[in-house]
Image (cartoon, rainbow, N blue to C red):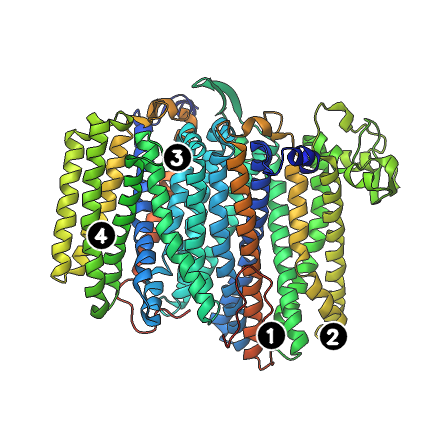
Amino acid sequence: MTDLVLLVDAYLVDALPEIWFGAVMFALAMYVVLDGFDFGIGMLYATRDDEHEKETFLTAFGPVWDANEVWVVAFGTMLLAAFPPVYSRVLADHYLLALGFVLALLFRGLGPEMREQRDNERWKRYWDYSFIGGSFLAPLLFGTLAGRWIFDAPTLSLPALLTGVGLVTVSVATGAAFLTAKTKPRLASDLRTYGIIATLAYLIGVVALLTTVVVTDAGGAAEMVLSLPVGAIVVLSVVAGGGGSVLALRGKYRAWLVSALGLPALLSLLVALLLYPTIYPPTGLTVREAVVSPLALNLVTILGFPALLLVLWYFKFLYGVFSGPIEGEGYKN
Amino acid sequence: MFLTALPDVLIQGWALQLSPELASRAQFGWTISVHIIFASLSVGLAPFIVYFTWKDVRTDEERFTRLRSFWVKVFAAGFVMGTVTGIPMSFQFGTNFPQFAEVAGELIGGPLAFEAKMAFFLEAVFLGVLLFGQERVSDRTYILSSVLVGVGAWLSAFWILIVNAWMQTPQGFEMITRNGMEVAKLTDPLAAFFTPRMPWMYVHMVNASVISVALLVAGVSAYIVWKKRDAAAWNTALKLAVIILLVTAPLQAVHGDAYGRHVADTQPQKFAAMEAHYDTGTADLHLLAFPKSIDAITDPKAENLLTVSLPGVGSFLATGGDFDAEVLGLNEYEENPPVAIVFWSFRFMVGLGFLFIGLALWGGYLIYNRRLSESSRFLKTMIAASPLGYAALLTGWYVTEIGRQPWVIQDELRTSEAVSSTLSGSEATLTLVGFVVIYIGLILVALHVLRWLVEDELRELGVKVSDDDRWYGPVPKVSDDD
């Protein structure tokens, strides 16, 4: 019985609210990294005219996008489970952005799936538009929403829009790296160019964003931005982006993919730094104020963490099954 | 609710702007009505997929390869539709009903997060393997993938229904003040997860999903068999669907009867609305009800209905044996759910339930006489009945959800208090219109995809299919020679 009482009255460990903040940010990072390259595939798809090349892109996208997208649900529901007021306010205060984002996801998800249902030129073209448009709008709206949340800024402001654009460009960069690692050399040199341009655009965007934040002190984040950890993230991003571009030019595509995926991961880490301890800057709500009671948090920890590990194993399995470059016809359906 | 507020809406002028509450409720109701069709398709189709995959891999018979391949395609299209319509659902708890999310966060957040982590991922990951991985994994892993996809679908329903059942019969919490707001604090997880309603709801919903899919499988099979009587695979599928209906349809009626008693015990107001029972006292059971006038449709009351009723049987059902028991009437409450919608939805659902039992028995009789594929009348009836499972499933949910009004959490939080205070009527109306337009397009696309899959199957079976592509949807007409 004493064990049960302990479970009710106190967090399993003192830092459990902070651990959960980290877990929620981890889910966000998984989403931004994994669905990010899906978005990138969707945007780069716009540059393809050849049906065979389109099919190659869709083959790389097909088996994994759905599972990747679930990370946004994991992020949202983990946020709700641990910090309900933040979940409520983030979504309610950014109503049109949030619902615009889910509708963009809808068009992105349906596009490739519906395209395959009918061998007809015009039908395919409409679903291509759906795929491309959704893949562009989803990261733009999600990033803009995040910018508003983190910097307490209006939609049409530099901090919000630069965050949106940052997510778009980093998605193109990782999408290009992922596709290059999955396709034949002929496509690779072409994709490499897009990837390097997107990487540079992203790095410039991040620096512009942080400069704007320092100058305007948006959301009171200037001091944090000038701190050592944020400086380290910027330096690491420049190293990963620059180094990745060099690796890409030398044809070391696997290494390029690893360093490219580091960019959205570092971006998520930046978000986490900016949201701690004030998890909802518009109202000044902190992690400790927003967190649920010990029993509820202990419960989601005991049941949720093993589940999270299992999910990571599923992903290892999934990417293992579909690893390596795509051959000729793609996967048999 | 919608009908009573309609005049106000029209008075507000040409902009047709709804109040944030009304627009939010209409939007949630509409989006979940579309979503639940695809969600229950996954739940109901899962056992069929597992069976076909197992038979296909183990026996290598052509008919099972055909059935597996066809229904996996339907499952995949349905799963994508379910994913893209399901994500807006979880977001709307925050965008439209943030007070609900904040008040109930400790209670509903856990189960919703478990749904994502334990169920949704499982389904999404192994569907990828099921769709694209047959050449890349062993037979055993392939069969296991189909099982895991099914387990994912059933677990999804489990966690989601924990949340919904808690909203009907909330327990395991206390109200405390946090950040200046009255919120529910979890005190007893077992009580909160396994509420009195939970087992009733789970069995009823999973069984309803299987019935709906069995009717869909039967309808599609009947259509193909009607076009080509000796299509071995589809005779097998038709027979299988009828056998499943023979078990599940009667089970739903017996279970539903007991479920009704449970509702009378735990949500007397909802039960009274289901029977349009206004005055406290013995309740009659209206077996059949016909409106005498237009008023009776929108305001069903005993005096303006032509009913075939069993006196006292309402009391008998509510209490499990006492004809004279007092049943609380709607007049006892300050505010009631929209009685008309609940009353008629309930009758519609029950009526369809009995129709399904009749269809199952008819099919069973034909199987017994080995004439299942010969009776054109039966085949045509099953084709016509194929969407009716979903009609019953939706109206059943209307009874459950609209019958709970004016509460979002029974006796704890009113729906009107749960709506976002920062939401404007024009924003809410805008997104409502957007969801209505987009989802109608989505349903049309889904129906066309199903039709094309059936036509492709017929072509493969050597049946000539007309290329006449009539297109009623918003997307331009397409045809093969385009």
Q: Nearer the viewer, residue B136 or A213?
A: A213
Which numbered circle lies on residue B371? Answer: 2
N-term mark: 4 or 3: 3
Q: Are marks 3 and 1 on the same chain?
A: no
Q: Earlier in the sequence, mark 1 or mark 2?
A: 2
Q: Nearer the viewer, mark 2 or mark 4?
A: 4
Q: Chain of mark 2?
A: B
> Toward the viewer: A21 or B249?
A21
Q: Nearer the viewer, residue B142 or B476?
A: B476
Q: CA distance from mark 4 to mark 3?
A: 31 Å
Amino acid type of the residue that numbered disc 1 sits on in the rendered structure: Asp
Q: Which residue is mark 3?
A: A79
Residue sitting at 44 percent across and 70 percent down? Answer: A121
* Tag of residue A198: 4
Confirm whether circles 1 and 2 share one chain. Answer: yes
From the viewer's perspective, tell me whether residue A192 is left or right of residue B236: left
- Residue B135: x percent and y percent? 37, 70
Q: Which residue is mark 1?
A: B468
C-alpha span from label 2 to label 4:
66 Å
